[in-house]
Amino acid sequence: MAAPVSRLTLSESLALGPEWRHACHAMLYAPEPGKLFGRIPLRYAVLMQMRFDGRLGFPGGFVDVHKGSLEDGLNRELAEELGDAASGFRVERSDYRSSHAAASAPRVVAHFYAKLLAREQLLAVERAAPHARDHGLEVLGLVRVPLYTLRDGVGGLPAFLDNVFIGTARDQLLEALQDLKIVDSNYISGIKLPARR
Ligand code: GTP
Ligand code: MN
Ligand code: MN
Ligand code: MN
Ligand code: MN
Ligand code: MN
């Protein structure tokens, strides 16, 4: 299983020694007026990606803290992984949410951002993504996160959460959905996960 991690403030993270690598990832999301089956309101489109290693994560990657800001590095990674549509917006420090440091080697501190886009911007990201430099290589495809539970009590977000996630991505997702009020907080705490295979 994943190594335990500890939560740090951004300034604590930036004070870590040179043996630490920094990574930045972003959750992009936008209002989504559609209804699944004409019945289930979607409310938001939230993007994750299927990675080369078969795990789900957010777009982003390693940043060199000696070459510009965290956000410069993050926006460069987004352009590599998402393509040209990523130049239609910029993830800023004000979109920063949290940092987690791995408790054991490799020494990586992961910074997480969430960016609210206009619906058209998110649709442009989805259209451009198959043309991105890393498409088919590091990134196997963008996915939207289902934010509902179907009548069987598993289909939708519970089943999605039963996938394998990279690093702390699963916690980053749940915390952002809750804190940004993308879903109701009672909804998240009420989710029963399917039994692990
Ligand atoms: P390269 O260009 O091949 O170096 O990959 P990258 O720069 O795109 O890095 P990548 O996004 O694969 O991962 C950077 C580090 O962050 C690795 O330690 C990953 O395990 C970790 N990581 C990747 N995605 C996520 C994510 O969504 N959340 C968290 N918390 N960590 C992630
Ligand atoms: Mn990279
Ligand atoms: Mn990446
Ligand atoms: Mn990358
Ligand atoms: Mn790369
Ligand atoms: Mn690489």
Image: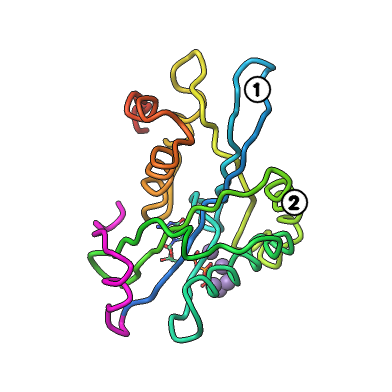
Q: Give the range drawn in magenta.
A: 1-19
Query: What residue is shown with label 2?
Result: 124
- In the image, residue 4 lies in the stretch drawn in magenta: yes
Cα distance in 3D space between marks 2 and 1: 21 Å
In the image, 4: left or right of 54? left
**Residue for point 57% across, 50% down:** 28
Residue 55 position, x and y percent, is 48, 51
**Residue for point 37% across, 30% down:** 185
In the image, 139: left or right of 127? left
- In the image, residue 170 lies in the stretch drawn in magenta: no
Ligand 4 sits in quadrant? bottom right
Q: Is mark 2 within 8 Å of ligand 4?
A: no
Query: What residue is shown with label 1?
Result: 36
The type of colouring in the image is rainbow
Which label sits on residue 46? none
Find residue 107 and report its image quarter.
Answer: bottom left
